Amino acid sequence: MDEPESKVDEGPDRRKMPWLTMTVSLLSFLLFFGLVVVMIYLNRVYYQSPDEEARRLQVLEELRAADRKTLEGYGKTPKGYRIPIERAMELMEGTRRTPEKP
């Protein structure tokens, strides 16, 4: 006797599923690896070690001290003489004219 053929729904074709899983896994790994490489690059570019930061602060303080010395002291330049900024402001205050009212 022939048995009646009954179609049993077995679901989607699973023969292609390992390739899809492997492809998605590979893409995920490559994305993760790319992000790690970008983070390492950004860390090297923007991170400053404490020694380097201390050196930069010392250079900045030296520059500020040189500027302060220039602004607050007397000296001679190739174009003339330099006076402290406070003294220059006092001198300019005496020469300033007030506008006359009509």
Image (cartoon, rainbow, N blue to C red):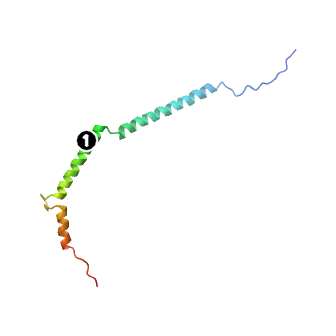
Please identify the residue farthest to the right as the structure is shown.
1
Local packing at callout 1 (Cα closer than 10 Å; few below 14, some 14-19, many 20+) is few
Is residue 10 depicted above or below 100 in this figure? above
Q: Amino acid at mark 1?
A: Arg
The x and y percentages for residue 54 are 27, 41
Depth check: give the residue in front, 84 or 41: 84
Q: Is residue 73 left or right of residue 50?
A: left
Q: Is residue 30 left or right of residue 85?
A: right
Looking at the rendered structure, the number of numbered marks drawn on it comes to 1
Depth check: give the residue in front, 67 or 22: 67
The x and y percentages for residue 59 are 23, 45
Is residue 93 depicted above or below 71 in this figure? below
Q: Is residue 4 left or right of residue 52?
A: right
Please identify the residue farthest to the bottom as the structure is shown.
102
Q: Quadrant of the C terminus?
A: bottom left
Residue drawn 24% across and 77% down? 98
Residue drawn 18% across and 65% down? 88
The x and y percentages for residue 61 are 23, 48
Residue on which disc 1 sits:
55
Quarter of image, res 87: bottom left
Residue drawn 18% across and 73% down? 95
Q: Secondary structure at mark 1?
A: helix
The x and y percentages for residue 47 are 35, 39
Residue drawn 39% across and 36% down? 41
Q: Quadrant of the N terminus?
A: top right
